[in-house]
Image: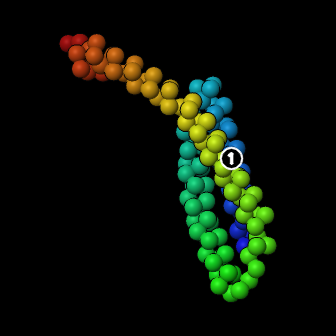
Amino acid sequence: MIDNTITELKQITNELKKAIILDIEDVKKANHERLVARNEIKADLMDTLTKMKQVLNEELSSAYKNGDDISVFKTGVDELETNLRELYTLNGKLASIVLPVKEMYKEIIEEITEQNGGSLVEVMA
């Protein structure tokens, strides 16, 4: 059971890593539609990941309380931790690309607003 949970968590992290890699490519190509389309999928994967991490913690705790040797799961848990660290790194890479673009858009909007006397859109009557 614990092995199955670890395997499922690894699959989820791999799916998230693939999605973030695609996000990075789409940001570079300015393919916003695909980015937006993946957001819901990634949110669902993150929710599942969070729930499954809790399940794994409960399973390991229960096995430990039952006197089971949980060290047999060390390799799988270590691999999962590596996957999570890779996911974190990829997410940071995506953020390092997206945040400057966001700031650039913010500056453009502020400049246009300033030029239009405090309004983003100038209305001519």
Judged left or right of residue 84, residue 43 is left
Q: In the picture, which quadrant includes the N terminus?
A: bottom right
Q: Nearer the viewer, residue 63 or 25?
A: 63
Q: Residue furthest bottom?
A: 66
Judged left or right of residue 76, residue 120 is left
Give the percent coordinates (x, y) of residue 17: 68, 46
Q: Which residue is mark 1?
A: 86
Q: In the picture, which quadrant includes the C terminus?
A: top left
Residue, x 50% and y 26% (percent of image)? 101
Image quarter for residue 89?
top right
Q: Is residue 73 above or below residue 119?
A: below
Judged left or right of residue 1, residue 105 is left
Q: Is residue 69 above or below residue 37?
A: below
Give the percent coordinates (x, y) of residue 57: 62, 71
Q: Residue furthest left?
A: 125
Q: Is residue 80 above or below residue 100?
A: below
Is residue 35 visible in the rendered structure shown here?
A: no
Is residue 25 visible in the rendered structure shown here?
A: yes
Image quarter for residue 66?
bottom right
Which type of secondary structure does the marked residue at label 1 adopt? helix
Residue, x 74% and y 83% (percent of image)? 68
Q: Amino acid at mark 1?
A: Glu
Instruction: Report how many numbered discs are placed on residues in the image.
Output: 1
Give the percent coordinates (x, y) of residue 46: 58, 55
Image quarter for residue 7?
bottom right
Residue, x 46% and y 29% (percent of image)? 102
Residue, x 64% and y 81% (percent of image)? 62
Q: How are the colours assigned in the image? A: rainbow
Q: Mark 1, residues whose alpha carbon is within 10 Å: few (<14), some, or many (≥20)?
A: some
Q: Nearer the viewer, residue 62 or 111?
A: 62
